[in-house]
């Protein structure tokens, strides 16, 4: 919404963008990565180059020649020359064997890590060289992280863990948002449970609820269904797909090729390189997948 885009007051967040661009919408005159998180209406989009076909909205996240190498004797190159565009409303699956750079890629898009080379822009604004406070705000107010390890606070109940996500993203009614999201992941009857009293799959669902309770527009999920039985995994997959309806981009790292069949796009990594980036032409309905 226009109010949410009030750039001077909110120097570093991103809004869920509608699937269709808003022609002529001005670009916010703000600091790097300025977008704001909880609006569902039109937002300022970067200008479209004249030679691009009209229906294609500009990317929300762009990577250009991004690499990440780790220092040290071994000098591991975790990611090399990654060029990728992610658009609002897209459901993107990242596939690849263990060690191929999937988590590295996700961490760079979420500004948990900085690239060794290349450029990352979000909503047309440079993330790469942005100061730490800008990145911190971007992580808090623009990104929903679902980590491979759940990282729940052991001393907080399920409800308090999820509320923490909503609090960090500064949602207006964090407790209500937390309660609602726990219901949506099927844990409405586990609100007062501490993590130790929850199964692995339930803990994973609390972690997912905590990420989504932020309402942030960029959802980055590392193996979100790894611990879940098929039926619960499918519910979570449906919930993640729902996020795209309000213009969020959802990036899911998985080994599960059935999940990849439901995606808009599949990106494949091998040894730190993007070896495929393709649209899924015959997207499978959720009712038609099983694993
Ligand atoms: P994936 O998620 O596909 O399993 P990662 O992105 O975690 O792969 O890792 C890619 C490569 O980078 C692996 O070889 C891994 O050992 C290495 N790597 C990841 N994180 C670090 C780190 N902090 N320091 C050194 N090497 C790392
Ligand atoms: Mg990983």
Image: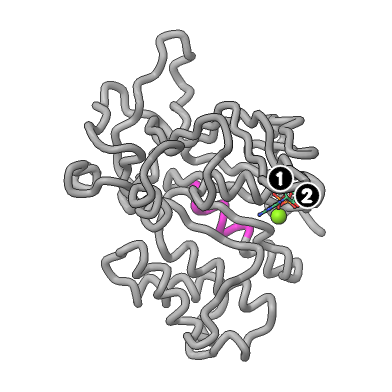
Residue at (58, 37) in percent of width and height? 116
Q: Where is residue 227 shown, x and y percent of the image?
A: 73, 70
Residue 238 in magenta stretch: yes
Residue at (42, 48) in percent of width and height? 246
The quadrant of the picture occupied by the N terminus is top left
Residue 209's place in the image compared with 288, above or below, is below
Magenta stretch mostly in which secondary structure?
Answer: helix
Q: Is residue 119 left or right of residue 135?
A: right
Residue 183 in magenta stretch: no
Q: Is mark 2 within 8 Å of ligand 1?
A: yes
Q: Where is residue 214 shown, x and y percent of the image?
A: 41, 62
Q: Where is residue 247 shown, x and y percent of the image?
A: 44, 43
Residue furthest to the front: 73
Residue at (60, 48) in percent of width and height? 106
Please report the bounds of the magenta region as a residue range: 237-244
Q: Is mark 1 within 8 Å of ligand 1?
A: yes
Residue 131's place in the image compared with 242, above or below, is above
CA distance separating discs 1 and 2: 6 Å
Q: Is residue 170 left or right of residue 115?
A: left
Find out whether the residues at labels 1 and 2 contact each other: C-beta distance under 8 Å: yes
SS at mark 2?
Answer: loop
SS at mark 1?
Answer: loop
* Disc 2 target residue: 99
Q: Quadrant of residue 216?
A: bottom left
* Disc 1 target residue: 101
Residue at (73, 34) in percent of width and height? 273
Residue furthest to the top: 51
Return the residue nearer the eye: 87 or 131: 131
The quadrant of the picture occupied by the C terminus is bottom right
Residue 27's place in the image compared with 110, above or below, is above
């Amino acid at each position: 919404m226009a109010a949410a885009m009030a750039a001077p007051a909110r120097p570093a967040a991103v809004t869920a963008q509608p699937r269709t661009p808003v022609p002529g919408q001005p670009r916010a005159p703000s600091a790097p990565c300025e977008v704001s998180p909880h609006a569902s209406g039109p937002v300022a989009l970067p200008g479209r180059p004249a030679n691009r076909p009209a229906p294609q909205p500009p990317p929300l996240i762009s990577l250009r020649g991004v690499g990440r190498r780790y220092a040290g004797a071994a000098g591991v190159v975790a990611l090399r020359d990654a060029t990728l565009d992610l658009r609002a409303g897209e459901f993107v699956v990242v596939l690849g064997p263990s060690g191929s750079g999937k988590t590295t890629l996700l961490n760079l898009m979420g500004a948990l890590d900085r690239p060794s080379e290349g450029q990352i822009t979000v909503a047309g604004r440079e993330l790469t060289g942005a100061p730490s406070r800008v990145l911190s705000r971007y992580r808090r107010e623009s990104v929903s992280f679902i980590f491979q390890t759940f990282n729940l606070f052991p001393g907080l109940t399920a409800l308090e863990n999820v509320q923490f996500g909503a609090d960090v993203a500064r949602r207006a009614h964090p407790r209500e948002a937390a309660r609602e999201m726990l219901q949506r992941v099927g844990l409405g009857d586990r609100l007062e449970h501490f993590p130790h009293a929850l199964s692995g799959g339930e803990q994973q669902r609390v972690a997912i609820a905590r990420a989504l309770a932020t309402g942030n527009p960029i959802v980055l999920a590392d193996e979100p269904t790894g611990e879940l039985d098929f039926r619960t995994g499918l519910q979570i997959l449906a919930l993640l797909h729902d996020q795209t309806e309000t213009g969020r981009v959802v990036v899911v790292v998985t080994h599960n090729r059935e999940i990849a069949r439901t995606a808009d796009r599949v990106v494949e990594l091998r040894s730190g390189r993007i070896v495929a980036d393709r649209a899924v032409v015959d997207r499978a309905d959720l009712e038609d997948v099983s694993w």
